[in-house]
Image: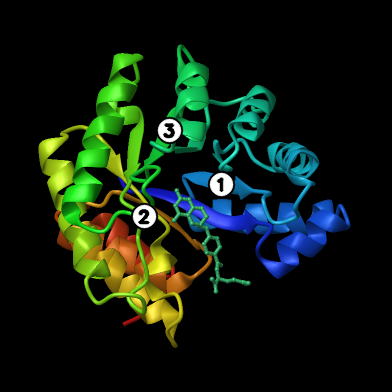
Amino acid sequence: MFTVIGERINTTLKKVRAATENRDADYIRGDVEKQVAAGATYIDVNAGARIGHEAEDMKWLLSVIMETTRLPLCLDSPDPAILEMAYDMVDQPPLINSISLEKERFDPMIDFLKGKECRIIALCMDDSGMPQSVHDIFSRAQLLVKELEAIGVARDDIFIDPLIQPMAVAAENGTMAMDSVEKIMKELKGVHTTGGLSNISYGLPQRKIINRIFLSMMMARGFDSAIMDPLDPKIMATLKTTTMIQGNDNFCMNYIKAVRAGEIIA
Ligand code: THG
C-alpha cells in the first residue's frame, strides 16, 4: 500500500500561517478533515515558519488536529527537541520527520529513538550537504539503515528520503532520485522510500503536471510513499491509476470504484 503523507498543515503556507497566528482552529480542522477524506495515511505537521514560535505553534496544531482525527501524524521539524515534545503529545505512534546524518541531528535523534514506538523518515543528508549523486544518496541510506537497525528499528518503520531536488537547478535531479529509489528498494529490502514530491517542480511553471508525472515515474522504480497534497484530485487519480497498472489493485476494483465516484476522469 502506498503511504500518502498529507503535507498541507505547514506554516510556510500563507493560510495555515495566518490560521496558526490567529489560533483559528476551525480552519485547521476543516483542512485536516478534507485531507483525511481524500485518503491521507498520515497528516504532516510542520510549525517551523514562525521563527521563535515553533514549540507553541506545534503544540497548538497537534491539539487541534488530535481533536479532529485519529489518523497518525507525521511530526515534521529539523529540531530534535521539538520532535521529542511532539512525540510526548500524540496518542498514536507517529512518523517522525526526520533524522539525518548531520551530527547535530543524528546524535540526539538516535538517543531519543531507542525503544520508542514510532516510524522514522531518514534524510540522505550529512554535514557535507545535499547529495550530488546516486552514490551519495545510496551510501547515506545504507548508513542510516545500519544505525537505525542497530538500535532495534525495523526496516518496515524506516522511510528513506533521497532528497528530491528541483529540475530547474540541474537536469540530473530527476534521474538521480529515480535511480536512487530503485537501488534503495532493491538493495535495502524492506525499507520504504518517501520524499517531498513537489520539490521536483520548484521554480518551473505548471508545477502540478510535473509533480504527477514524476510520481508515476518514481512509483515505477519502487517509490511507495510521498509527502504530497491529497487535495489535488489529479495527483490522487495518478496515484490510483499507477497502482492499478502496477498490478497492485485486485481486479482493478479500486480504480473502477474511483472512476464511479467521479475521482478519475480521463
Ligand atoms: N522531505 C521531508 N519532509 C519535508 C519535505 C521533504 N517537509 C516539508 C516539505 N519538504 C514538504 N511539504 C510541503 C508542504 C507544502 C508545500 C510543499 C511541500 C506547498 N508548496 C507550494 C509551493 O511551493 O509553491 C505552495 C507554497 C505557498 O502556498 O506559499 O504547498 O522534501 N522529509
Quadrant location of the N terminus? top left
Residue 179 drawn at (x, y percent): 15, 57
Quadrant location of the C terminus? bottom left
The residue located at (34%, 33%) in the rendering is 158
Residue 100 drawn at (x, y percent): 41, 38
Give SS at disc 2: loop
Which three-letter amino acid code belongs to the residue tagged 2?
Met
Residue 143 drawn at (x, y percent): 25, 31
User: Residues at badges 1 and 3 in contact (C-beta under 8 Å)?
Assistant: no
Where is mark 2, residue-wise? 130
Q: Is residue 155 above or below residue 62?
A: above
The numbered mark at residue 43 is 1
The residue located at (75%, 61%) in the rendering is 17
Q: CA distance from mark 2 to mark 3?
A: 19 Å
The residue located at (31%, 23%) in the rendering is 147
Which three-letter amino acid code belongs to the residue tagged 1?
Ile
Q: Nearer the viewer, residue 214 or 144?
A: 144
The numbered mark at residue 146 is none
In terms of image quadrants, where is residue 240? bottom left
Where is mark 3, residue-wise? 120
Q: Nearer the viewer, residue 84 or 3?
A: 84
Mark 1 Cα-neighbour bin, 10 Å: few <14, some 14–19, many ≥20:
many
Residue 31 drawn at (x, y percent): 67, 58
- Asked whether, in this view, residue 220 is left or right of residue 161, the answer is left
